[in-house]
Amino acid sequence: MKILLINPAPEHYTRARCAPLGVLSIASYLEANGHTVKVLNRATKSTDINVELDEFKPDFLGCSLLAVMSVKDCIICSKAAKKRGITVVWGGPYVSCSPELTLELGCMDFISMGEGEETWLELVETAEKGGDLYSIKGLAYLKDGKTVTTPEREFTDLSKLPKINYDLINVRETLYKNYDYGGIMGMYLSKGCTGHCTFCYNSAFHKNCYRSRNIDLFIEEVRYLKENHGLKAVAFADELFGYNKETLREICQKFIDADLGIHWGGMTKIGLFDKEDFQLMHDAGCRWLEFGIESGAKTTLARMKKGYKPGRVEEDLQNCRDVGIISLCYFIVGFPDETEDELRETCALVNKISYTKFVCSYFSPLPGSEIYDKLVAEGRHTPAKSMKECMKTKIFYSPKPNLSKVKSLDLKVVRSHILWSSFTKKNFIENGKLNYSVAKKDILDVLRSLKGHGFKNGVEQFFISGYEFLDIFFYGNFFPKIIKKYGLDLKERK
């Protein structure tokens, strides 16, 4: 059968150049089983969906959603497909956690719940044989106006999946630069995380289970992308890179033996590895690691169920620095019931680890997370009543809903100041000049969007990105009393 899989264009968002890994994995699995698949990566280049449908004439259309910003484009593509009698299936973490709201849009036949490789294969092969699609595991659909979910599908054995066919997309459109490294592409080796963070949907989507693909096939993919598509560095998209010391050493040794000349980085946990492990990673090509620190307060970390000792933060980050690995730390401000004193503890930690890069976000209750269910049960958060209501949410620019005990203005100033300190990091100086790497990346992404999505969309993206930059600059620099209140001062940092 013929399947058209879509990575939709996000709305009002500038950082959208990552490879659509979930879509590519499903597409490669279907291809390996004899089906014809085409992938449209509309996040990098929009085309007329009507022309695409008329030329390719698919039996199925699939849309993958990671976040609410892409819903609008999925609706456009799905309605066009439905007019032509094409079966439409949506999938991805976002819709898997919100099947009722998604199905109410009325422009899809099914939702693929959880990971989709085996569900998609059974779906298209059952349709090919004229079988009953409504009995397939891992689906949700509407029947008489009510949401029906079929039995949950077991996890796929990732080690048996075929190589990913990256030729299904324009790879060079997904390459980007960061951490002073160019030619970076997101790739995945594993799925799932063993953590139990209360704000994350991992427990609902991956069941806190870590699973890995075949490392030798992954190495072949990296080599192919380097030799044919200009890959120079790999950003592991894994929820938890390394998993444990044994797994980490196997991965690193494979990279060393392959002698690819590739740099790489990924997301891992505080407290998993020691200095010799970080040194091995560096020897194998690792040049950056990302850590979900989230807070500097023990009480907040306990509510988050982060599962690490705060003292390990400085130790692990210093070990990274000693061996030559750049560290990037993620923080959350405005966590439910967070107090001013707890926020000060986070700011104190930020001051101590000023030699790292920072990403700071407002807390937002995610469907499927433990804290989301808790807040709803306590009557402190009202779930959205429709997908259209979800689409109006702007979690990046405002701490709403503010469920902490800290004033919203204080949260905005602290977040902006932390982000601005990462923009102007004095410890990342090139040729004696301040390195505005994050800001430069945003600007370059917007300029690239002029080519990929047309002039009108590019201008819109330019103003959105400009607003975001000015917002951070203003709140991060023009409220000295609040900055002092929480002990944040760029001038006093080492």
Image (spheres, grey):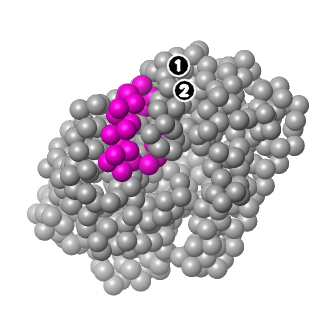
134 relative position to 169: left or right: left
- Under mark 2, the amino acid is Glu
Q: Residue at x 53, y 54 (%)?
A: 179
Task: Report, in whole angstroms, how far the alpha carbon at label 1 lies from the one at label 2.
Answer: 6 Å
Q: Element under label 2?
A: helix
Q: Residue at x 38, y 36 (%)?
A: 278
Q: Nearer the viewer, residue 345 or 471?
A: 345
Q: Nearer the viewer, residue 343 or 147?
A: 343
- Under mark 1, the amino acid is Gly
Work out whether 48 lies above or below 195: below
Q: Element under label 1?
A: helix
Q: Measured from the top left, where is residue 270 in percent x and y?
A: 45, 28
Q: Circle 2 is placed at which residue position?
A: 314
Q: Residue at x 59, y 52 (%)?
A: 391
Q: Magenta part of the protein: which range?
A: 269-290
Q: Count the marks: how many?
A: 2
Q: Nearer the viewer, residue 321 or 112?
A: 321
328 relative position to 141: left or right: right
Work out whether 25 lies above or below 274: below
Q: Measured from the top left, where is residue 486 in percent x and y?
A: 78, 26
Q: Circle 1 is placed at which residue position?
A: 311
Q: Measured from the top left, where is residue 283 in percent x and y?
A: 34, 46
Q: Residue at x 87, y 43 (%)?
A: 478
| Magenta stretch contains residue 150 | no
Work out whether 304 lies above or below 157: above
